[in-house]
Image: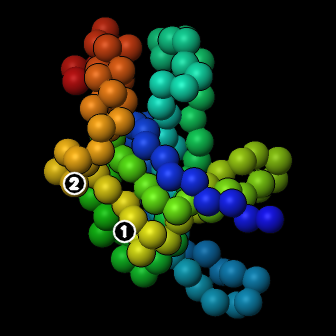
Amino acid sequence: MMRTVDVIGIVMDDHGTKEINTKTGAIRKVRGFTIVDDSKVDDLDHNTAVGIDINIWGDNVDQIKLEEKEVVALKRCRTNDYRGSIRLNASEEDGIYHRGELKVIKDCFRIYNWFKKVTSNLYNF
């Protein structure tokens, strides 16, 4: 059974865009990145941050302006177990919110303030 979730987190690693040959023989664009949030983090300095990989599928995913260390929110991500690890999949139509679009989402401020606090000694944020 496929489930969907809404997520908010900090972009930690942008894996870039690539083209994938699907099982049906179609070629689709996918952009991957990793996000973290404050749900299970002890200390980013000791690499204990828990993140999740997200793939966004669509023809224009390379035009999405995501930057590392910024807050992002995604709606209707589908859960997937890929080679033993859980990851999320979304399409560009599902709802990807970042930068100015996040001002109305209360949890974005909480995540941003958490990240700023735990990384204040690691990054010039």
Is 32 on the left or on the right of 23, as rendered? left
In the rendering, at what x and y percent does residue 91 appear? Answer: 49, 71
Is 102 on the left or on the right of 96, as rendered? left
In the displayed structure, would residue 40 be above or below residue 19? above
What is the three-letter code of the residue carrying label 2?
Answer: Glu
Which element is circle 2 on? helix
Quarter assignment of residue 21: bottom right
Instruction: Give the crowd class for mark 1: few <14, some 14-19, many >=20 residues within 10 Å.
Output: some
The N terminus: image quadrant: bottom right
The residue that appears at 57% across and 35% down in the rendered structure is 51
All told, the count of numbered labels is 2
In the displayed structure, would residue 23 be above or below residue 3? below
In the rendering, at what x and y percent does residue 95 appear? Answer: 39, 65
For marks 1 and 2 on the same chain, the one whose residue lies earlier in the sequence: 1
Is 118 on the left or on the right of 104, as rendered? right
Task: Give the alpha-carbon distance from disc 1 to disc 2, as whole Å.
Answer: 19 Å
Which element is circle 1 on? helix
Quarter assignment of residue 52: top right
For the question of whether residue 101 can be seen, the reply is yes
In the rendering, at what x and y percent does residue 124 appear? Answer: 22, 20
Residue at image mark 2: 101
Residue at image mark 1: 62
